[in-house]
Amino acid sequence: MALVALVTLVGGPVLGQRDILRVGVLLTALLVVGATATLRSRSSLTLESRSKVGFVEAGNPARVRLSVRGTGRTTGARLVVEDTVPLALGGTPRLPVPALADGEVLDLDHTLRSDVRGSFEVGPALLRARDVLGLTESRQVLGEPVVIDVLPRVHELTELTLGDLGGSRGSSASASSTTSPDDASIREYRVGDDLRRVHWRSTARRGSVMVRSDEHPGRPDVLLLLDDRESAHRGRGPASSLEWAVSAAASAAVHLHRRGHHVRLLHAGVVEPVRELDEASAVRSLLRSLSRLTPGPPDSLSRSVAALGRAESTLLVAVLGDVDADDVRPLMSARPLGAPALALLLRTREWDAGARRADTAATPGADEAERGLQRAQLVLARAGWRTATASPADAVPDVWSRLARVGARAPVAAPDVRDALA
């Protein structure tokens, strides 16, 4: 439009055509009026507030609310607020805004949804203003971006009984603890321990800082070991074996947390530290760590096994990818003495689309992987581990039921992750 206006303004006098010159003047006037209206609109709105979502569970919607306040400046432009949203969360919504009086507040809502866990940046919001003819547009940034974590899917799981496992002392994952705090075992203080757990009487008697480990028979501490090696998993995106493993670990964490257990996560050789003052915050931190987890290097499992020997737990739950007997043997010596242990092994080759095709070239490798998995399962079972295997068609609750071995028990209420984190 500007180019046409320039040509007609110059060409009209040269050709002696007043009508062409009038067209150029009209086009120029439209551009000037449109630009003035859009520029005035830059200060017609301010962002009053943004709802703090923080996190959303994969597959579940989350509502975001933007409150905008009018400044009283009237313009002839059409106003639209766009909240910058990644495609993984549904894409950027366009929210029309009517003319607002000075001080008038309008709430604009849109919905986020994602099937992919991860950490995403949402915002800032953009105010777009266009004149009525759509000739000019101006943009203004409203507010600052925020980070939203998409947590892994959490499934309903059956109760877990530990009575037939060594070191469990007949405990149950749903049993309530009746042991008094005075009977809690005492150990030396370690960096990161909650100072509220200091046992002052033992500290004074022994001359070093001692803390209560609070490892009651009915509520053992739980250590979740997650095999995050990129080489140990197959598939892509939400349908990959790594995502299945992350969802299984998250479901176990929430399930055990809701029954009063202290749960920590071990992956890539690092035990996630507990800095929070309460268990609800601790499990929220654990799920956020799982949401941000990325595939690890080839030595990730061996580093985790080495760290396992330094960790303190009375129940070990391992979610393993593509492993063989050599991979799991170090777990035998690293396992805490007398601690019950459970292993969930994934048949990762079945997640590989190429391995599922009916071609003979893929059969030998798949057979060897299956034999390696069976040997690993046998090694763990002989060492007193309770094991179960999972395939792409298996649901997390079904595999957990096989691991729990309580088929006669009814499943507990579905763990809504938002209630668990409240």
Image (tube, helix red, strand yellow):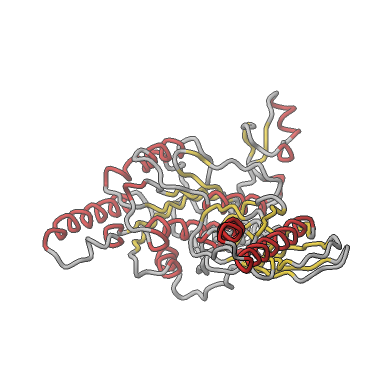
- Quarter of the image for residue 139 reads bottom right
- Picture residue at 40% right of the left edge, 48% below the top: 227
- Picture residue at 52% right of the left edge, 52% below the top: 290
Residue placed farthest to the top in the image? Answer: 207
| Left or right of residue 270, residue 9 in this image | right
Residue placed farthest to the right in the image? Answer: 102
| Left or right of residue 359, residue 395 in this image | right
- How many tags in the picture? 0
x, y percentage for residue 379? 29, 49
| Left or right of residue 309, residue 149 in this image | right
x, y percentage for residue 247? 47, 60
Give above or below for 199 relative to 103: above
Q: Nearer the viewer, residue 8 or 128?
A: 8
| Left or right of residue 264, residue 204 in this image | right
**Could you tell me which quadrant the N terminus lies in?**
bottom right
**Could you tell me which quadrant the C terminus lies in?**
bottom right
Q: Nearer the viewer, residue 277 or 365?
A: 365
Whether residue 218 is visible to the viewer of this picture, yes or no, is no
x, y percentage for residue 115? 49, 65
- Quarter of the image for residue 191 reads top right
- Picture residue at 40% right of the left edge, 43% below the top: 296
Residue placed farthest to the left in the image? Answer: 360
x, y percentage for residue 232? 32, 49
Q: Nearer the viewer, residue 284 or 260?
A: 284
Whether residue 193 is visible to the viewer of this picture, yes or no, is yes
- Picture residue at 79% right of the left edge, 55% below the top: 43
